[in-house]
C-alpha cells in the first residue's frame, strides 16, 4: 500500500496542486482515501476516520449504502448508457416533484455547476434581461457567471473572483449581501428592469453555515416578484437535507426555479434545475433556450438517485436533529471549558463552528472567525481519527449512519485537540 504523502507527490505531477478539485486540497497534503462504509472512511494507510465531509454533502445515507450500491450495479449489468430517454429519469423526476411541488418541470444535468449555469441562461432567455444578482460568499459552482465573490474552495484558497472571467460577463453580475435587504433593494432601485434573476443559497453553506434572518427570504420573494425578476434558490446543499423535500417548503417561500444536486444522486454525479412550467417550457426542444448533455439523466445516476430517494423517504430526519443537538452542545461545552469563544451554526444535519467569535450572522462575521485556529483543530482532529470539513468556509454534515457513539467520540477528541491548541497558543 502507498501512503498519502507518496501518492500526493505522484498526483502533483499530473494534476495542478495534486487534486481534481481545489476544495480537496489542504496542508501539508490531502489524505488519499481508499474506501468508505457508513459514517467512516479509511485512508490508504489503513487509518479509519469518522467522516463529516461525506463527499461534500451527497452521502446523507452514509458511505456505500447497500441499496444504492445494489441499484447501481444492477443497472450497470442492464446498461451503462443508452443515449435515449429512460423510464428511470421520469421516475426520479416525479419523486422530486412530489416532494417539491414548485418544481413543476425539471431537467437533469451532471453537476450543480451545470444546473446553475443553465438556470441562469434560462432566466435570461425567459425574461429577456441581461443581469443577475448573487450574494457575496454564496457558491453556485465554478462557471463564469457565479465565480464572482464566491464561497467554498474559492474563498478558502483566496480567489473568490477568478482571473479568466471576461469583464463582459462579470459586468452582468451584481453582488448583494446575504441577510442585508438594503443591499438588494439598492440594486433593484438602480436597475428596476434589468435584473433577470436573483440566485441565492437559502442557507449559506459555503462560508460555513449561515442561516437566513427572519423574513429575509420572504422579502427576496417580494422584491423579485415586484420587479419581474426570477427568484432562484440554489438547494444543491439544502435539498433533502432537513426533511424529504426542499428548504423552501419548510419556510413557505416558493422560488421560480430551484437548483438541486448532491443528495438526489445518491453519491453519483448529478444536478437538476426546475420550477414553473411556463419558464421550463422555454428550454429546447419545447422552447428556444438551448441546453444539452451527453450524460444528463444517465441510467447509473438515475438508478442511484431513485434508490437514494426511496431510502430517504422512509427516514426519520428528527433523529438527525437529535444527533446534531448533541454535537453542537458538545462543541460549545468544550470551547467554553477552555475559555475560548466560538459560534456554532447548525441546521438538522449540517453544522459549522467558528472559533474566536460569538455570533456569525453574515459573511463579514464569518470572515472575522479565527480560520487559522480552525485549521489547527482540523489537523488535530485528523490525528484523532475525525475527518471534519477541511476549511472554515465549508460545512460539516451528518448522515443517517452517524450514531451517538460517533458524536461522543468526536466531542471527546475535540476536547483533547482544543487543549493542545490552547497550550500551543500560550507557549
Ligand atoms: C450551493 C451549491 N451550489 C452549487 C454547487 C456546485 O455543485 P457541483 O460541485 O456539483 O458542480 C455547490 C457545490 O458544492 C454548492 O454547494
Image (cartoon, rainbow, N blue to C red):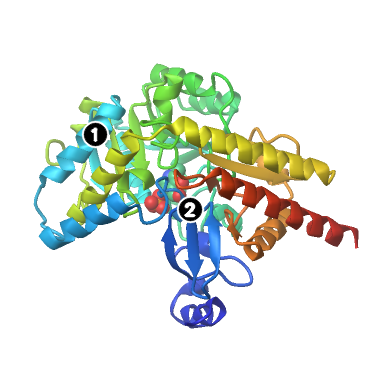
Q: Is mark 2 within 8 Å of ligand 1?
A: no
- Residue on which the image places disc 2: 39
Residue 135, above or below 185: below
Q: x and y percent of residue 316 in the render?
A: 41, 32
Q: x and y percent of residue 305 in the render?
A: 27, 46
Residue 258, above or below 218: below
Q: x and y percent of residue 149 in the render?
A: 55, 47
Question: Based on the displayed image, in which of its 4 quarters is residue 420 positioned?
Answer: bottom right
Q: Look at the numbered disc 1 and give the secondary structure of its residue.
A: helix
Q: Which residue is nearer to you in this view: 341 or 38?
A: 38
| Residue drawn 55% across the image and 38% down it | 323
Say few, some or many: other residues with alpha carbon within 10 Å of mark 1 (under 14 / 14 to 19 / 20 or more): some
Say few, some or many: other residues with alpha carbon within 10 Å of mark 2 (under 14 / 14 to 19 / 20 or more): many
- Residue 347 seen in render: no
- Residue on which the image places disc 1: 95
Q: Which residue is nearer to you in this view: 313 or 359?
A: 313
- Residue 223 seen in render: yes
Residue 79, above or below 239: below
Q: x and y percent of residue 352 in the render?
A: 61, 43
Q: Look at the numbered disc 2 and give the secondary structure of its residue.
A: loop
Q: Is mark 1 within 8 Å of ligand 1?
A: no
Q: State how far apart marks 2 and 1 are (Cα).
A: 26 Å
Q: Which residue is nearer to you in this view: 75 or 212?
A: 75
Depth-wise, is mark 2 or mark 1 nearer the camera? 2
| Residue drawn 51% across the image and 39% down it | 349
What label sits on residue 286 in the rendered view?
none
| Residue drawn 64% across the image and 38% down it | 328
The mark that comes first in sequence, 2 or 1, is 2
Q: The C terminus lies in which quarter of the figure?
A: bottom right
Amino acid at each position: 500500500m502507498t501512503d498519502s504523502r507518496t501518492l500526493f507527490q505522484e498526483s502533483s505531477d499530473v494534476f495542478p496542486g495534486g487534486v481534481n478539485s481545489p476544495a480537496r486540497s489542504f496542508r501539508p497534503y490531502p489524505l488519499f482515501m481508499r474506501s468508505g462504509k457508513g459514517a467512516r472512511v479509511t485512508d490508504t494507510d489503513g487509518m479509519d476516520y469518522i467522516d463529516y465531509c461525506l463527499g461534500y454533502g451527497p452521502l446523507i445515507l452514509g458511505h456505500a449504502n447497500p441499496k444504492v450500491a445494489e441499484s447501481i450495479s444492477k443497472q450497470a449489468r442492464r446498461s451503462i448508457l443508452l443515449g435515449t430517454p429512460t423510464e428511470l429519469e421520469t421516475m426520479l423526476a416525479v419523486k422530486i416533484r412530489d416532494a417539491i411541488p414548485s418544481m413543476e418541470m425539471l431537467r437533469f444535468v451532471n453537476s450543480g455547476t451545470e444546473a446553475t449555469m443553465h438556470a441562469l441562461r434560462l432566466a435570461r432567455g425567459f425574461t429577456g434581461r441581461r443581469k443577475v444578482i448573487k450574494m457575496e460568499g454564496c457558491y453556485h459552482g465554478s462557471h463564469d457567471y457565479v465565480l464572482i465573490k464566491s464561497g467554498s474552495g474559492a474563498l478558502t484558497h483566496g480567489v473568490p473572483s477568478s482571473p479568466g472571467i471576461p469583464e463582459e460577463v462579470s459586468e452582468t453580475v451584481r453582488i448583494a449581501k446575504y441577510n442585508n435587504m438594503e443591499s438588494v433593494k439598492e440594486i433593484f432601485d438602480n436597475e428596476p428592469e434589468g435584473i433577470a434573476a436573483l440566485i441565492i443559497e437559502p442557507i449559506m453553506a459555503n462560508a460555513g453555515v449561515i442561516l437566513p434572518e427572519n423574513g429575509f427570504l420572504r422579502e427576496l420573494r417580494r422584491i423579485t416578484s415586484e420587479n419581474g425578476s426570477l427568484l432562484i434558490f440554489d438547494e444543491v446543499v439544502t435539498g433533502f437535507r432537513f426533511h424529504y423535500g426542499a428548504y423552501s417548503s419548510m419556510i413557505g417561500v416558493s422560488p421560480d426555479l430551484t437548483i438541486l444536486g448532491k443528495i438526489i444522486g445518491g453519491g453519483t454525479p448529478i444536478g437538476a434545475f426546475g420550477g414553473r412550467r411556463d419558464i421550463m417550457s422555454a428550454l429546447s426542444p419545447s422552447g428556444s433556450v438551448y441546453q444539452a448533455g451527453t450524460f444528463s439523466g444517465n441510467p447509473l445516476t438515475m438508478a442511484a438517485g431513485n434508490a437514494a430517494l426511496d431510502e430517504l423517504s422512509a427516514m426519520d430526519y428528527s433523529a438527525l436533529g437529535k444527533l446534531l443537538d448533541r454535537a453542537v452542545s458538545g462543541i460549545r461545552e468544550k470551547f467554553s471549558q477552555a475559555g475560548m469563544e466560538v459560534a456554532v451554526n447548525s441546521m438538522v444535519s449540517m453544522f459549522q463552528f467558528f472559533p474566536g467569535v460569538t455570533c456569525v450572522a453574515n459573511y463579514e462575521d464569518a470572515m472575522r472567525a479565527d480560520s487559522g485556529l480552525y485549521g489547527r483543530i482540523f489537523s488535530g482532529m485528523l490525528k484523532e481519527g475525525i475527518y471534519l470539513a477541511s476549511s472554515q468556509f465549508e460545512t460539516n454534515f451528518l448522515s443517517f449512519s452517524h450514531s451517538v457513539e460517533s458524536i461522543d467520540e468526536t466531542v471527546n477528541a475535540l476536547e483533547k485537540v482544543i487543549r493542545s491548541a490552547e497550550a500551543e497558543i500560550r507557549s
